[in-house]
Amino acid sequence: MKRLLISLKLALFLMFFSVYQVYGAEPSSKWLKNQWEASWICCPGKSVYDYGVYHFRKSFFLKDIPSSFVINVSADNRYRLFINGQDIGCGPERGDIAHWYFETFDIAPYLKKGNNTLAVLVWNLGENPPVAQMTLRTGLIVQGNSGQEKVVNTNKGWKVLCDTAYSPSVDRRYYSGCNDIINGLKYPWGWEKTLYDDGKWAEARVMERGQPYGFGDRVDRVLLPRDIPMMEESIQRMASVRRSEGITVSPLFLEGSSPLIVPPHQKISFLIDQKFLTTAYPEMLISNGKGSSVKITYSEALYKNGQKGNRDDIEGKKIDGYYDQFFPDGGKDRLFSTLWFKTYRYIQVDIQTGNDSLTVQDFYGKYTAYPFKENGFFKTDVAGIDKIWTVGWRTARLCAHETYFDCPYYEQLQYIGDTRIQALISLYVDGDDRLMRKAIKIFDWSRSYEGITTSRYPSRFIQYIPPYSMFWVNMVHDFWMFRDDQQFIRECIPGIKTVLEWFASKVDPSTGMLGPIPYWNFVDWANQWKAGVPSYGSEGGSSVMTLQFAYTLKDAVDLLNSFGEPELAKKYKTLYQNLIKSTNKLCWDPARQLFSDDIKHSAYSQHANILAILSDALPSKMQQPLFEKLNSDTSLIQTTFYFKYYLIQAMKKAGLGDRYLSMLTPWQNMIDMGLTTFSETPEPTRSDCHAWSASPNYDLLATVCGIVPAGPGFKSVRIEPHLGMANKIHGRVPYKSGFIEVNLEKNSTLVKGTVSLPENLNGQFIWKNKKIKIVPGINKIECKTGL
């Protein structure tokens, strides 16, 4: 048994390592411009629209092992690819019907002389897919890159089997799709291996040929090459069994070195604590146990009387989450897994055996997420900040897969409001901009006939949150500041123009502010606002909505001026000035020295005043007093974690960045509550993992270390640190030619240390009113503390 487990671990390591070996091949330019020779195939006699799990196989003979063997693969909805029994990778990258991605693999390392088998698991979740999963109809397509590989092109030579072992588990489905019920008695064990006998399988039914962008007159499943890396997959051991019923579970079980044996006619249960939230494919290796059932329930937290409480506590609490269920067939070494990854901190395993004993040989997670690396860092002598950094980065990672997610447990949808913050974290900690590029591009694809973007995309259910469309424009501006890619930004300008025009058409001439705005005008989950919408946010006359539009217009004018639209920039600058003037006239309260939320002065929030600072609705000399008011007046409607990002930007703009480290108490409180990721809202919260709450991973570097682009394209840097209560800070941000690093110490008289810049980057170091030129290499810094 021990030898078996060691062999299994080695095989899994090689499998995960293989993904990075085989992925990265380039598709032939021929298949980017011309109709594919391969066709989409499906299972005859089965609906291409209903729930179904299918196994496809293609056997082929090779006289010699080629140095390369490149194939292009896609499926609808999803697939997992096997070569001679080895798990190679999965896909396709999520897009939409008019932009359907395919992956390119060089499978030569897994081929052998003689008979080879290419096997693909394909599934369509029918009525219960994730909301983010687009679909046309079930299908698989494989296109060889050249004449050498055309032997595996999908056509009638492929075999297919509809796997009736699977059925959907729709209890607690949420937006992330259905879960799996798998009957091992019906499963075709070994189907992916070369020696498996598929003689009774059906011949695949051939549908339309594959087509890239621009070919022909069809715009359904237009094939595009993958533009992000494959997701990381790595073994992740579970931490501990916190409680059990009906059996004693050895601590060695979760280490994979002591199988769990459940005797016949037993009902047992045990609760696993991963110790931190994660996203992973659960994998359980089982032998024997015919007539047994295994139920696996996943949850972010445990509940008592409907409340989560401290996430570390389990006393008197129960699990309440979605589940998968397996029914073993009694065979040896059956590896049960799931079609889609799960999000969990806690897992409860419930097993009931029949006449045979069941052996659980191993149980672990296969961690998966976008392969971000922690290239940046932040360190300080202020207690607790290291934990905030760690928890924030975990939050950001779990909310980034093939798209950014709002949350990995409930929705797994990419929302603009969340994504703008997430993208900045990615740039500062990893430096990889590919997921940000995809997000900007895919939101541009989502624009409606009216001109605005959807609030989230990809999404089968169309939703509009107009404030998010404005933030998409700001997000494009963010990218422009950080990356010197003129062509990419230029391609976004038409979309920006339609978004601006949609809002401009909603300005009420009688007030000079935004009038009635349709759809869901969500701004923040403030307690006093219904569904997150500020007063008059939809009816018209909202300072929050109007000032956000003004804030967006500032960025838009910069972009339009820089990309050949000076007249349009002038028009929108005039509109910006008029919006500011009207909002001051109708919403400024001279007695309270604050902006009201609306022209009726019916409510007052931090949000309106934050946006007044960010939009320069008041002269700069008035912005610091305004921030002091909005930050100290507890009668104002308060921001929650999402909008605290904008609160901090307003504080920084008002010249009060030194306060930042003292404003992290809400994040420390979450950690004290046992949270291992940052939640969607203050308690009670729905989601325990929401990356819009991970903004400290941006601000510790951008505000405390003060590292920001000095202009478009990040061709120079501006470093204005705000140490505040810290005596020491050390931060690093990845840059295209290396790293920007700030290492400073402060005492009562001096701030001193070093700033290191990579080659080809110059800039300014600013301390109080002192400006110091900094150049590539190590720059020594010494300034008086109280300048």
Image (cartoon, helix red, strand yellow):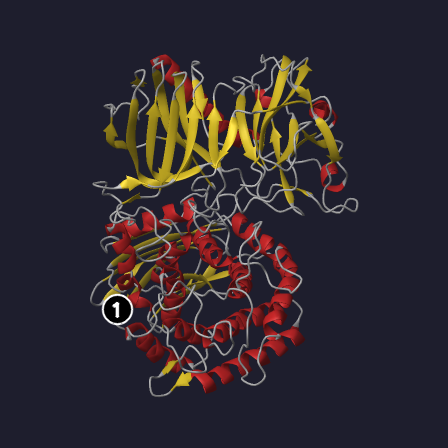
Q: Secondary structure at mark 1?
A: loop
**Which residue is drawn at the image coordinates 34% and 23% (left, top)?**
352
Q: Relative to 727, is 637 on the left or the right?
A: right
Rendered image quadrant of residue 121: top right
Question: Residue 424 at x, y = what percent?
Answer: 46, 56
Camera-side residue of 418 and 128:
128
Rendered image quadrant of residue 117: top right
Looking at the rendered image, the quarter that the N terminus falls into is top left
Residue 778 appears in the figure: no
Question: Residue 263 at x, y = what percent?
Answer: 30, 16
**Residue ID for mark 1:** 785
Q: Amino acid at mark 1?
A: Thr
Question: Residue 605 at x, y = what percent?
Answer: 37, 73
Mark 1 neighbour class, 10 Å CA radius: few under 14, some 14 to 19, many 20 or more: some
Q: Residue furthest right?
A: 216
Question: Residue 177 at x, y = what percent?
Answer: 50, 41
Camera-side residue of 568 and 25:
568
**Which residue is drawn at the image coordinates 42% and 29% (left, top)?**
325
**Which residue is drawn at the image coordinates 30% and 52% (left, top)?**
388
Looking at the rendered image, the quarter that the C terminus falls into is bottom left
Relative to 508, residue 16 above or below: above
Q: Relative to 293, is 36 on the left or the right?
A: right
Residue 276 appears in the figure: yes
Q: Relative to 749, is 500 on the left or the right?
A: right
**Which residue is drawn at the image coordinates 53% and 47% (left, top)?**
131
